[in-house]
Image (spheres, rainbow, N blue to C red):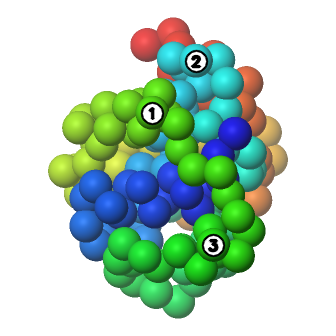
């Protein structure tokens, strides 16, 4: 299983610089579609239903305070932890996600996640209103059930 930093770096290598919000949404959709198509998680870090959409807290802590992220931003994290790298199958799924979602505006992606069950259900379970903060987890099973049914 990959680490979220590897996925983020691969996305940035394919698309170029982007906002941290957009990166978070693309990472989320990579996880979602990897689950739907393979029945396995792409990465093991948890995803939470924050008010602006899904966020991987571990990734957020690494880019906190930065609006725009460039390729190489997470390289030190990858090198320091000796991650194994993405497989060709993982890259293929990420590429497919980027083909569909990669040109979309970050706010459009955020709004899309707000219309989908995994984010809505996680927020509902913890009783969070639309603009309230939340750390409710979006589970892999919730993501699999929703995206594999589309």
Eye-nearest disc, 2 or 3: 3
Q: Secondary structure at mark 3?
A: helix
Residue at 40 percent across and 83 percent down: it is 67
Instruction: Give the residue furthest to the top.
Output: 149
**In which quadrant of the rendered view does residue 92 lie?**
top left
Instruction: Give the residue furthest to the left.
Output: 103
Eye-nearest disc, 2 or 1: 1
**In which quadrant of the rendered view does residue 1 lie?**
top right
Nearest the viewer among 120 and 78 is: 78
Nearest the viewer among 5 and 120 is: 5
Residues at marks 2 and 1 touching, judged by CB atoms closer than 8 Å: no
Compute the Cα span from label 2 to label 1.
14 Å
Compute the Cα span from label 2 to label 3.
27 Å
Position in image of residue 40 (x %, y %):
67, 24
Position in image of residue 126 (x %, y %):
80, 47
Position in image of residue 65 (x %, y %):
53, 89
Residue 120 appears in the figure? no
* Number of marks present in the image shown: 3
Residue 35 lies left or right of residue 48; in this view the side is left
Circle 1 sits on which residue?
A: 88
Residue at 48 percent across and 59 percent down: it is 8
Residues at marks 2 and 3 touching, judged by CB atoms closer than 8 Å: no
Q: Which of pointers 2 and 3 lies earlier in the amino acid sequence?
A: 2
Q: Secondary structure at mark 1?
A: helix
Q: Secondary structure at mark 2?
A: helix
Quarter of the image containing the C terminus?
A: top left
Circle 2 sits on which residue?
A: 38
Circle 3 sits on which residue?
A: 79
Residue 61 lies left or right of residue 29; in this view the side is right
Residue at 75 percent across and 59 percent down: it is 135
Q: 10 Å neighbourhood of mark 3: few (<14), some, or many (≥20)?
A: few
């Amino acid at each position: 299983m990959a680490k979220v930093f590897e996925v983020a770096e691969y996305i940035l290598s394919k698309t170029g610089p982007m906002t941290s919000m957009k990166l978070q949404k693309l990472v989320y959709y990579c996880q979602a579609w990897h689950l739907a198509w393979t029945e396995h998680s792409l990465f093991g870090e948890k995803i939470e239903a924050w008010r602006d959409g899904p966020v991987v807290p571990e990734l957020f802590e690494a880019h906190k305070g930065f609006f725009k992220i460039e390729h190489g931003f997470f390289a030190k994290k990858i090198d320091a932890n000796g991650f194994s790298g993405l497989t060709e199958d993982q890259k293929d799924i990420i590429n497919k996600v980027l083909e569909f979602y990669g040109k979309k505006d970050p706010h459009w992606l955020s709004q899309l996640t707000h219309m989908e069950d995994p984010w809505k259900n996680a927020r509902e379970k913890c009783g969070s209103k639309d603009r309230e903060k939340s750390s409710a987890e979006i589970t892999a099973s919730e993501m699999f059930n929703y995206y594999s049914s589309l």
